Amino acid sequence: MGVDAGVTDMIAMPEQTSWAMAAFVYILGSSGNGGFRTYVGWTNDLERRLSQHNAGTGARSTRGRMWSLLYAERHGTRSDAMSREWHLKRDRKFRKTLSQPFVADT
């Protein structure tokens, strides 16, 4: 499953950086037996990384579920993306806000 064309519309772009140098921080969401879950990570290639998560070759905690991209930000450096990832992992209120439309549908 690839990232559809509409995904680029939801990517927050805090810096003007070429796509070749960009690093992304992203939030995935998934509904399953354990309820709705979110996952926060960073990558240089959003489409490839989402495919890895859905194929079971991503992070161990994402295996066995189908994931959808809820949110993404583009950053100029890997270091900036990793720093933002650290903050997003601790911002449960923001992740809960992103998941509300999906939780209401189930």
Image: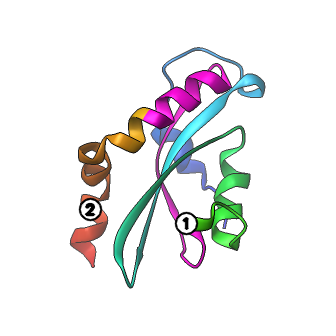
- 92 lies above or below 63: above
Looking at the image, which residue is at 56% across and 46% down? 41
Badge nearest the viewer, 2 or 1: 1
Of residues 90 and 56, the one drawn nearer to the viewer in this rendering:
90
Disc ID at residue 101 = 2
Q: Which residues are magenta?
A: 62-86
Q: Quadrant for residue 78, please give it.
A: top right
Disc ID at residue 104 = none
Looking at the image, which residue is at 71% across and 27% down? 19
Name the quarter where the C terminus is drawn. Answer: bottom left
Instruction: Please give left or right for residue 60 compared with residue 97 in the image.
Output: right
Q: Position of residue 95 (x, y in %)?
A: 32, 49
Colour scheme of the picture: rainbow
- 35 lies above or below 39: below
Residue type at numbered disc 1: Ser
Is residue 84 magenta-colored? Answer: yes
Categorize mark 1 by other alpha carbons within 10 Å: few (<14), some (14-19), many (20+): few
Name the quarter where the N terminus is drawn. Answer: bottom right
Of residues 14 and 7, the one drawn nearer to the viewer in this rendering:
14
Residue bearing the label numbered 1: 61
Q: Secondary structure at mark 2?
A: helix
Residue type at numbered disc 2: Pro
Q: Position of residue 17 (x, y in %)?
A: 65, 17
